[in-house]
Image (cartoon, grey):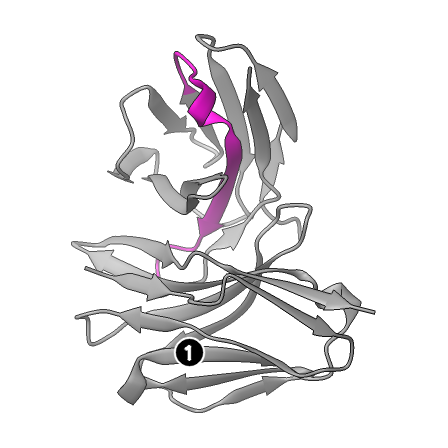
Amino acid sequence: EAGVTQSPTHLIKTRGQQATLRCSPISGHTSVYWYQQALGLGLQFLLWYDEGEERNRGNFPPRFSGRQFPNYSSELNVNALELEDSALYLCASRLRQLSGNTIYFGEGSWLTVV
Amino acid sequence: AQKVTQAQTEISVVEKEDVTLDCVYETRDTTYYLFWYKQPPSGELVFLIRRNSFDEQNEISGRYSWNFQKSTSSFNFTITASQVVDSAVYFCALSEEVDSSYKLIFGSGTRLLVRP
């Protein structure tokens, strides 16, 4: 069974541009999470989508946004890129039905802003 | 607020040594879940174990073992006879569920370097 898949693996953008990252959850999982792992800042919760809707967001500005599609895949958009947005962006998925279910992560997308 | 503390930033051991990674958590929830993940240089977070707050049994899986102690709010991870392939960053995480919103709160991670 395929795990969480993310694309692209690496992305280089210029300050001020927009970046789009994509994620496909594990088959059957309806919940998708996005985490940011910036150097020295650990894993920070960004967004949670479930059944096509944004259910929760972390302490990030509105230029971080996304959506979840009917097939439960998800897209993270970062507008007006800043140098400090350079980070590993990890997507994860889980089965929502059961409390405490494990969240499974993908390999991440490395975003570099120059 | 939920909090996870991994006080060891980096640990270096020689192959075949045993090593314990510490994790201390804070929560006001009576039901919660604890996790350990491994992050090799490639970046992917690999799930290792999940433990719920009602199950204080220690667990062993091959060379890995976990010691959950509610009394000290700790969930420590031991690797026996470490190998070079164990080199990675290890994260401890705690579930947070508020109004049906569920996510994981991570510790800052412990970088383990196993030298040949």
Chain assignment, label 1: B
Give above or below for A35 relative to B100: above
Give above or below for B37 relative to A71: below
Give above or below for A61 relative to B6: above
Q: Decide: few, some or many residues near mark 1? Use Cα within 10 Å; few <14, some 14-19, many ≥20.
A: many
State which quarter of the image contains the C terminus of chain B: bottom right
Residue positioned 53% across, 28% down in the render:
A22
Residue A76 visible somewhere in the drawing? no
- Name the residue furthest bottom: B57
In which quadrant of the rendered view does residue A13 lie? top right
Q: Position of residue B65 (x, y in %)?
A: 57, 84
Residue positioned 57% across, 53% down in the render:
B45
Give the left or right position of residue B46, taking residue A55 as reference. right
Residue positioned 24% across, 59% down in the render:
B97
Which residue type carries mark 1? Phe
Residue behind mark 1? B75
Give A106 or A89, whichever is nearer the viewer: A89
Give above or below for A88 relative to A83: below
Give the left or right position of residue B46, taking residue B99 as reference. right
Give A65 or B42, whichever is nearer the viewer: B42
State which quarter of the image contains the N terminus of chain B: bottom left
Which span of residues is magenta-colored?
A78-98
- Disc 1 on helix, strand or loop? strand
Q: Position of residue A70 (x, y in %)?
A: 43, 31
Give the left or right position of residue B40, taking residue A14 as reference. right
Residue B74 falls inside the magenta stretch: no
Residue positioned 38% across, 27% down in the render:
A67
- Name the residue furthest right: B116
Give the left or right position of residue B4, taking residue A83 as reference. left
Residue A70 visible somewhere in the drawing? yes
Residue A85 falls inside the magenta stretch: yes
Q: Position of residue A60 (x, y in %)?
A: 29, 31
